Structure formats: structure tokens, C-alpha cells
Image (cartoon, helix red, strand yellow):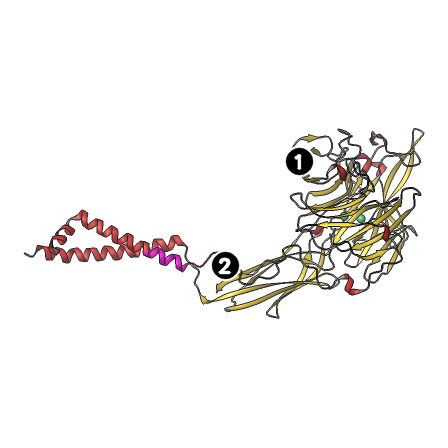
Amino acid sequence: MIDGWLMKLQKPWVFGRVVLLVTILFLSQGCLVTTSLVPSETPQPFYRRYQNPIPIPLANQALTALEPPTLLPSPVNMTAVNMNVTSDYGYFDGYNLFELQQVNKTSGEYFRSLLITDMEGNILRNKDLGYPPEFINTTTVLTRDFNFQKIVFWNYYTDIITYVDAWGHHEVEYNAINNTVLTIEKYYREINGTPYRFDSIEEYDLDGNKIWSLDCGTFIHYWQWCPYHDRLSNGVADVTHGNTVFFDSDEDILYFNARNVNTFYKIDHKTGEVLWALGEYGNFTLFDQYGNLRDNLFYHAHSVEQVDDNIFIIFDNDLHNQTNPENKLSRILEITIDETTMTANESWTWIGPPEYYCGWFCDADRLPNGNRLGTFGAQSHAINSDIGARLVEVTDAGEIVWEMNFPHTGELRHQVYRMERFRLTPILSSPGDIVAPSGSDIITEWQAWYNFRPKRTMTGNYILYHNNTIFAYGQITYDKFWRPSNLTFNIHGLKSGLHNFTLVISDEADKITSDTVLVKISPETIEPPPTMDLLKIGMTLIVTVCVLGLAFTLSVILGRRVKQP
Ligand SMILES: [Ca+2]
Ligand SMILES: [Ca+2]
């Protein structure tokens, strides 16, 4: 019987089938082995700790821990402020800096307090200073004192105020190149027997000496005045109504927004030359978010700021909309420009609901996590007159995640011109833990942002510790406009076991933030694993050669046996 099977096997087609079957069996076995050899491509985190991509928990230098809050004397009657806050997951944690104005609707009395609050609305600083506040370094706020009508530097740690003998309206700006301040001043010019109000941009040194001036009446013309005829309280035509100077120290460029001509200007600070203008009287071709050609993108806007290369954010109040005056939808607007093709496109916008409409005041900021902050800060809104100032944070997708409201209290109205979100220490991302076989090259990358939204590059230091020993150190340059700076480290030759890498970054005042990444190196040394394809090909070749060799030998032996009688 065995000889019968052997006879059949000797037939070439039967022998071929057997060889094929054996090969398939070997190959499938080989694949199983191969699969078990390849390590998981995405190692699972082995140690769960608080993940802080953003928001990051505030560092331990809490403002309240440094000194007690200076709550009195407060020009604003805070007991009459019925502030409320709502928040949701994903807001950018930090502190808020803004001037709160309290207005008595009947008597017209004005009170001002410069506040620093936490995200819940607890007041940590309350200072008798006015608007528009902003940080020029980690401890100093630049703003104005309405009692003395002077520009001031206020150190919110030491509570020391330094006065500059200059005043201006709507804006103060710091020039870090010259150590000077910029502001806007109004003047009147008579044209054909009629007075018109224009603005000039003025620069003062810290002793109050005027060192630079630019007359905006040289590039804005009286006939460009808003067709809705904005006037001052004395009846004079308010042609320009400048409300923003944004100074880019690194480029020595300033941007000037003239509310009543719906246009902002890029100006070379060295020469005073207007390099371009964007808006109703600008030289950009304008497109809305749908790609439609438009005569203008914003009406009586406020607070233009650069947020990235060729990207600007602005608060579009939508007052005196010349296409549809009843539109009345205020919004946060980002505009991306191309200085080669001279085109400007709406690249992001968040339109507030109709009841958020604000004809005057207001501010817009982009935060490090991509959220936007909108100061819908006027004391009254078109639909619900009880709302008052509302400060709103929205995600990139347009969801409201934080809102601070100042509803009316009897005759008292509350308004906010601009606000700033900030941290007390630098901001650091958390890249997450790493699991790798020994012999691997480890790359860790952190992102760092400065404490506040800087208009110039800022510097600090970093130290990377490996198990409490200094591994690397150096200087960081924090990018301007609150863009991230990357800190990348390539780490070689880690022994098996658990490694702690802690990155500490500091600002110019040596206030620090840290983040820890744990790296687990597995004990087995694993050569760089070949890919599945290479292994399959290798196994296939080996198995095929073996099987063919075996089959050939078998056939020779069996052939001899069958030939024997
Ligand atoms: Ca400013
Ligand atoms: Ca702001």
C-alpha cells in the first residue's frame, strides 16, 4: 500500500501539489513568527499623570501667594458690580487684565479701576488707573492715569508707578528700541472754513520729550470722512478717529487704525512712509470668507494686531456698515494678506449673536491654544440693553468656552475697552511620555510661549534635567505675537529603565515653568526591526529553498526505491 502511494507521489503533478502544500504551511508558520517579532508600533503610555497640553496648571508663583491683593481704595464701587462667569472645558487658563469703567447713567459720573482677575472673576489687583493696559515685560503694565493725565508704567508686583509726561487718547504703545512710548493725539484743521478733527502719532521719551511725530492728515483726507458723519460732542467732524497703534519693535514698523475711515495703515517708523493701507481706502483687493470680492471688510473697527506672518486680528464693530447699516453684527476677524498680489482675505471670523453687538470700544486677541478672546465691552448692546460689557473666549471651532459678564446694576453701567489674558510664568506644552527599546534615539519636543502676548521677541533660559542632573541648558528666544517656539532634544544611549527628563524654562525675570517627560527603555536590546515585507520575503526564500531541497532529495530516494522490484 505504501508502495502504491509512493508510485502516485512519483507522478510530477501529485509531487508538485505536495510541495506547494508544504510550502504554504511553512510560510504561514513563518508569518506568525514574524508578527510576534515586531514590537507594537504605538507603545501605550505606562504612567498616567496630569496631561497638560493646554490649559496648563498655573505655576506655583500664584499672584495671591506673593502679596495680599490691593483691593482698596477702589474708584469703582465693586459691591455694585454684579459680575458673573461661565466656563467650559478648553479655555486658556490664566489671569485677566482690563480697566473696568463704571458709569452712572443718570449723573454721567465715571469711575475707573484697573483690575487683574483670575478665571473665576476673583479680583487680585485693583488699581486707580485707566485704559488701555498691556504688558511690556513680565512685571510692568503700560497704561494711563486719568487723575494726572499721564502715561504710566505700573509694576504690579512692587506696586511702583513711573510717570511719563505725555497723555494722548485711545492708545499707548512701547518702543523697546528707543525705550520710548507712542500715543495718538488729536488736532483740528480748518478746510474751506470748516474745522475737521485729525490725529497724529506721537513718540515721547520717558522724560516726556517729544522725539517723533507723524501727521495722519498727510495720508487721510477730509473727504474720506464716514458718510454717516461721525462728530465729536462739540459738533466737529471726526475724520480719522485713530484708536490703535501696534508697534513691531523687531521690524521698526507700526500699524495705525483709523476707525472712521475703516482703514488701517502699515507705516515705516524710520521714514514715516505709509507702506500700504488695508480697508475702505486701502490698496488691497478684499475678499470675504466665502471668496467674494468686497469693497470693505470691517466698519469702525478697533484694536488691530499682527498675530502671525501676514495675519492680522481686528475687532469689527460693524457700526455704520455702508452695505447694510442694519446688519449690526460685531465680530472677531482675522485677515490674511499677500503683499505680492496685494490681496486680503478673511481667514477666520466669529460673529457674535445679535445681542452681543457693540458699536464702540472692543478688542480681539489670539491665544496660544488657538482660542480667540473677544472684548464685547460696550456698556449697552443693541437688543438686550441690560447686558453690559461681556468678555468672551471662543475656540477655533467657534464654541464659547469662557465668558465674563458685567450686567447693569440700577443706574450703573459697566464697560471694558480692551483686555489681556496672561500668565505669571512662561507657558510650556507637555509632549507626553515615551516607551522605547534600548538603543533607540529619543526625540523630545516641547513648545514654549511667553507669559503674555509679546510684540517683540523675548528671551529667557532653559535647563533640561536627566534624573536631576543637568543634561542641556541654554537661552530661549520666545517668538513674538504669542507664537510657539520649539525646544527639541535628541537623546542617545539611554540604559534600560525609567528616565525622568524635566525641562525648566524661565522668563527675563527668572520666573520658571517646568514639565516632566518620563522615558521608559525596555531591557531587551532590539536591533532596528526589519519591516514585515522584508521578513516575509526572507522567510519565503528560506522556506522555499529548504522545501525544494528536501523534495528533490526525497524524490531521488523514492525514485530509486520504486525502481526496485
Ligand atoms: Ca498699546
Ligand atoms: Ca487685547
The three-letter code of the residue at mark 2 reads Pro
Ligand 2 contact, mark 1 (Cβ < 8 Å): no
Residue at 72 percent across and 55 percent down: it is 94
Main secondary structure type of the part rendered in magenta: helix
Q: Are marks 2 and 1 in contact (CB under 8 Å)?
A: no
Q: How far apart are marks 2 and 1 (CA)?
A: 42 Å
The three-letter code of the residue at mark 1 reads Gln
Which residue extends farthest left? 565
Ligand 2 contact, mark 2 (Cβ < 8 Å): no
Percent across and percent down for residue 232 are 90, 36
Percent across and percent down for residue 510 are 73, 64
Residue at 26 percent across and 57 percent down: it is 546
Can the viewer see residue 440?
Answer: no
The front one of 275 and 32 is: 32
Q: Is the residue marked by circle 1 packed among few (<14), some (14-19), or many (20+) residues within 10 Å?
A: some
Quarter that holds the N terminus: bottom left
* Residue at image mark 2: 43
Q: In this view, does 45 lie to the left or right of 66?
A: left
Between disc 2 and disc 1, the foreground one is 2
* Residue at image mark 1: 289
Q: What element carries label 2?
A: loop
Q: Is mark 1 on a helix, strand or loop?
A: loop
Residue at 11 percent across and 53 percent down: it is 4
Q: Which of marks 2 and 1 is nearer the N terminus?
A: 2
Q: In this view, does 146 lie to the left or right of 493?
A: right
